[in-house]
Amino acid sequence: MAVLLPLMTTACSYDENISLCTVCVRLVYPENSTGPYAGACVELKDASASVFEGETNDSGIVLFSVPAGLYEVSSSSSFTDKSSDTWWQYNYNGVRSQILISHEYSEDIDLELKMSRKRIVH
């Protein structure tokens, strides 16, 4: 028993050092839409279902620092345009799968969005 006690305490102590990759995701909006805006939610999900969330800047870009792996990127958001007498609600959705992120190979990710809109009566 005295021999096993030191082995049990060393087996649980380790230094896990995870190296992160920086990834840029840019939302690509369809023609005749409002275009990029700050605050659109973007998610990166890896193969083990870990989810990383971020919000876009005014240019529709969000940066992530994530471990290397295989990812899916998605975005779903709504924006209400109140700039005129007629208000419009724009709904955006997009998903892209099988994205490899690694230190050796990584590129910026463009996520093309689909749009629907409806008129809001106020």
Image (cartoon, rainbow, N blue to C red):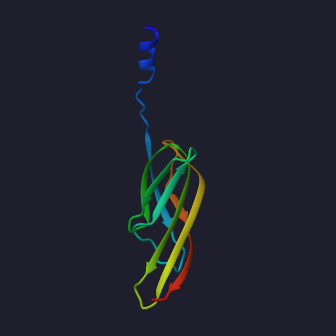
Residue 52: horizontal and vertical position, in percent? Answer: 47, 52
Residue reaching furthest to the front: 1
Q: Residue at x 52, y 66 (%)?
A: 76
Residue reaching furthest to the right: 98
In the rendered structure, the answer to whether residue 98 lies left or right of residue 11 reads right
Residue 22: horizontal and vertical position, in percent? Answer: 43, 49
Q: Residue at x 46, y 90 (%)?
A: 86
Q: Residue at x 42, y 71 (%)?
A: 37
Residue 43: horizontal and vertical position, in percent? Answer: 50, 57
Q: Residue at x 46, y 9 (%)?
A: 1
User: Is 50 drawn above or below residue 8 in the view shown?
Assistant: below
Specify the quadrant that holds the C terminus: bottom left
Residue reaching furthest to the bottom: 85
Residue 41: horizontal and vertical position, in percent? Answer: 46, 63
Camera-nearest residue between 77 and 4: 4
User: Is 106 drawn above or below residue 38 in the view shown?
Assistant: above
Residue 19, quarter of picture: top left
Residue reaching furthest to the top: 2
